[in-house]
Image: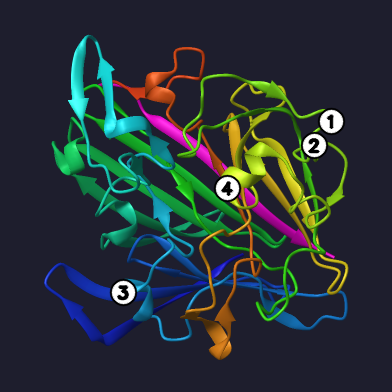
Amino acid sequence: MEIITKHIEHKAFFSTGSLDSFDLKNQNGMSVTILNYGATIAKIEVPDRNGEIGDVILGHDNLLNFISGRYYLGATVGRYANRIKGGHFTIDEEKFQVSVNKSGNLLHGGFEGFDKKFWLSRIIQSSTGTVLELSHTSPDGDEGFPGTMAVKVIYSLTDKNELKMNYFATSDKPTVVNLTNHSYFNLTGSASNTILHHVLKINADEFTPTDSFSIPTGDIKNVAGTPLDFRTPSIVGKYINVDYEQLEIAKGYDQNFVLNNFNGEVKEAANLYDPLSGRFMEVLTDQPGIQFYSRVYLDGTLTGKGGIKYKKRSALCLECQHFPNSPNENNFPSVILRPGEIYRQTTIYKFST
């Protein structure tokens, strides 16, 4: 049975809302802190092999810093996570132009995507437990996207050390949608350590190669014989600096993997193990892709939790999603949401040792 407590940051009143934080706890010593700003996961605290509690994601000690922060730390991103080439797409022969906020392309919803909004909160009590619901309404034309979109994320924490995220969205006009969580993981419990020794497995035989702007070319290639082959557990740092075009483009890992046997059911997409702490994380999802991101842009100028300077190999992301630039690639799974339909997505982070 989860316990949710709410805290209001009284010094954080803005014209569009106040910063609220919610603590989810279970019976095993695991706790999660979630903010109404950006529907952001601010902390995930789990025990290591010795029972010592550690925070396994990047963020800020002062929660107010999430509002002025960069890099989407722990945020829910949308309307469209990842990139859309040129910020344009066509639905039913009607062309749309949305914001271009990264090298002439759309990234993570635009200049003020879902990560920069105050979400409405509701704590729901039920016979199966207590959950946190965060909701937001994005108006027609927001960042150029068509349709008024109502979106919500329901967070729950189980006594199996599972953090569950259930996403829902509806729209009154045909539109596109792709939501994900952008947490940065370091299972050691301290970003003073790198993630290069972490052991990663991704259940994907294929990936979507990109051009020099990290936009998929439309091709789907096999990972066999490449540094992107994580079908069996592999040390993250083993090939991260090898001479391979896709790694050179991203200056590390920043690729979308095509998950095996996609059928809309929740199944394991990846798992991550830290030999130092013994922590093990499984990532389960019903999405067709997962973006493995080894944190290219952190350069030591951002001070995070515990006064630690976040450097480029201090964390990694595993973002469950539809493919980047799907609105412009007919051979990618569709991201179109029409009136009367409900977008649903489930992603689970499950921790053990």
Furthest-front residue in this view = 243
SS at mark 4? Answer: helix
Badge 3: how crowded within 10 Å, few (<14), some, or many (20+)? few
- Pointer 4 with pointer 3, Cβ within 8 A: no
Left or right: where 22 falls relative to 289: left
Would you place residue 258 above or below residue 116 in this image? above
Would you place residue 107 above or below residue 155 in this image? above
- Pointer 3 with pointer 2, Cβ within 8 A: no
Q: Earlier in the sequence, mark 1 or mark 3?
A: 3
Disc number placed over residue 225 in the picture, else none? 1
**Nearer the camera: disc 3 or disc 2:** 2
Q: Tell me the CA gap for discs 4 and 3.
A: 25 Å
Corner quadrant of residue 12: bottom left
Would you place residue 293 above or below residue 341 in this image? below
The residue to which callout 3 is attached is 68
35 magenta-colored:
no
